Image (tube, rainbow, N blue to C red):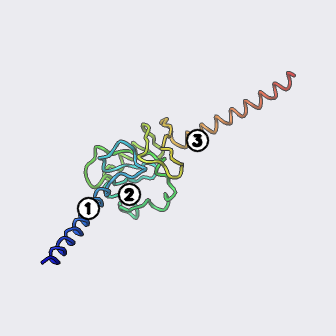
Amino acid sequence: MKPIKLIIIAIALSFGGMLQAQVSMNVNVGSPPMWGPAGYSNVQYYYLPDVYSYYDVPSSQFIYYEGGKWVRKAHLPNKYRNYDLYSGYKVVLSDYRGNSPYAHYKQHKSKYAKGYRGKHQDNIGANPGHGNKSNKMKVTGKSVKQSKQAKHNSSKAKSSHNSKGSKGSKGKK
């Protein structure tokens, strides 16, 4: 009788361990990615304007147009394999409920063109490629290309101004 009780207790303990493992497994499924925008824990989709794609948070899948149809995959298409999700802007689609956010793709693509930057976003986690700093990208409403060009022009103007100033000071000595 005693061995039967021990067997029953052993089965109950192992069954309890399996339940605990199942619970912790379900908690992690569908949580926002570390590159996701902070402050939006109950959102289903992000639109990623730079790569013309959506991200389904609960299923951890990207949704994009490929081969004449919308597909769901765990990764972006190869042409965007080097895209930095931490620094790219994520449009939070908090007002959409359903399974086909791409039903509004034309409006999203028009309203949030490639290079779109809305209000400042911090990421949920730190960018592993940039130390422990979170994404503190300055948002100006300009596209990334415009911002880089403005920065380039500014440094060029400073360089030109400094070289003129040094010539002038040599002549005055």
In the displayed structure image, the side of residue 155 where residue 129 appears, left or right: left
Classify mark 2: residues with Cα within 10 Å, few (<14), some (14-19) or many (20+). Answer: many
Write the residue at 43% across / 50% down: 35
Disc 1 from disc 2: Cα separation:
30 Å
Q: Earlier in the sequence, mark 1 or mark 3?
A: 1
Helix or strand or loop: what does disc 1 sit on?
A: helix
Q: Which residue is mark 2?
A: 62
- Total marks shown come to 3
Write the residue at 30% across / 61% down: 25
Q: Which residue is mark 3?
A: 148
In the displayed structure image, the side of residue 42 where residue 141 appears, left or right: right
Q: Are marks 1 and 2 in contact (CB under 8 Å)?
A: no
Q: The C terminus is located in which quarter?
A: top right
Write the residue at 28% across / 63% down: 21
Which mark is drawn over residue 20?
Answer: 1
Q: Position of residue 72 (x, y in %)?
A: 35, 61
Q: Nearer the viewer, mark 1 or mark 2?
A: 1
